[in-house]
Image: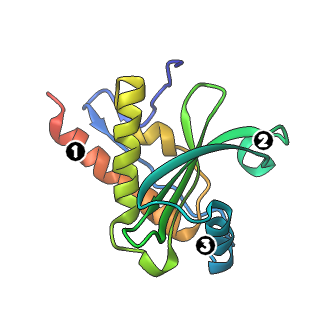
Amino acid sequence: MKNFEKPWLNEENKVWIWENIAPNVTGNSNPNYWNALVEMFGPGSPGYSERTTSVRSVDHFGTMAPVDVRWTVYRSDEEEILCIHGNWINDEGYQRPFILMVNPDHQRKGIGTQMMIFLRERFMREYGHDMDADITFHGVKATESGAAFVNKYVNEDYEKRNNNIDT
C-alpha cells in the first residue's frame, strides 16, 4: 500500500481530527433498492457470507470498466438478510466502501456497527494491521443516514485513538 497523507492528524498536538462528511447521494435508501439487493443475493445460511462480482459504476469508480466488488452479507438465525456491504480496492491499494446498507426494518440496532467490526477483524487477518476508518471513509459518497453512520463511526474511532495517544 502507498503512503497515504493524513491531513486529519494534527501532529503538533497529536490529536486525530475528522471533518464530518455531508450527505451527497439520494435514492439508495429506499425499500425497493434494498429489495433488489436482497433478491440479488437470494437465500443463504445464517451469519456472514462473501462473494465477489464485477460491477460497473461511473459514479463510484470514475470509469465504466468493471471493478471487482467484494460483497459481505449478514443473515439472521432465521436467514433474513440484515446487512449488505460491498467494497473495492482503489488505485492506491486502499479498501473503499461501495455500499453499506442495513435492512430498513432493522436499522438503529447496531447491525451496521457489527458489520464494521467484522470487516475490521477480517482486514486485520488479511493485511496484518488495522483498517484506518479515516482512509476508508474519507470522501465517501453517502445518503443522509449513511453519512450519519460514517461520521458517528469515525468520530468514535478517533475518540479511542485520542485517548490512547502518548503525549
Q: Position of residue 62 (x, y in %)?
A: 78, 41
Q: Is residue 48 above or below residue 135?
A: below
Which residue lies at the image location 37% right of the left edge and 65% below the top edge? Answer: 111
- Name the mark on residue 29: 3
SS at mark 1 in the image:
helix
Q: Earlier in the sequence, mark 1 or mark 2?
A: 2
Taking the image as drawn, is residue 154 in sight? no
* Looking at the image, residue 114 lies above or below residue 36: above
Contact, CB < 8 Å: mark 3 with mark 2?
A: no
**Around disc 1, counting alpha carbons within 10 Å, would you say few (fewer than 14), some (14 to 19), or many (20 or more)?**
few
Q: Earlier in the sequence, mark 3 or mark 2?
A: 3
Nearer the observer, disc 1 or disc 3? 3
Colouring method of the image: rainbow
- CA separation, marks 1 and 3? 30 Å
Residue displayed at 36% across by 47% down: 118
Count the marks.
Answer: 3
Q: x and y percent of residue 8 in the render?
A: 41, 37
Distance from the alpha carbon under mark 3 to that under mark 2: 22 Å
Q: Amino acid at mark 2?
A: Gly
Q: Which mark is residue 62?
A: 2
Looking at the rendered structure, the kind of residue marked 3 is: Ser
Residue 50: image location, x then y, percent: 53, 47
Specify the label residue 160 is tagged with.
1
- Residue 122 is tagged as none
Front position among marks 3 and 2: 3
- 29 or 79, which is in the foreground? 79
Q: CA distance from mark 1 to mark 2?
A: 34 Å
Residue drawn 39% across and 68% down? 76
Q: Amino acid at mark 1?
A: Lys
Q: Residue at x 64, y 62 (%)?
A: 24
Of the two numbered discs 1 and 3 on the same chain, state the one appearing first in sequence: 3
In screen coordinates, is 16 left or right of 75? left
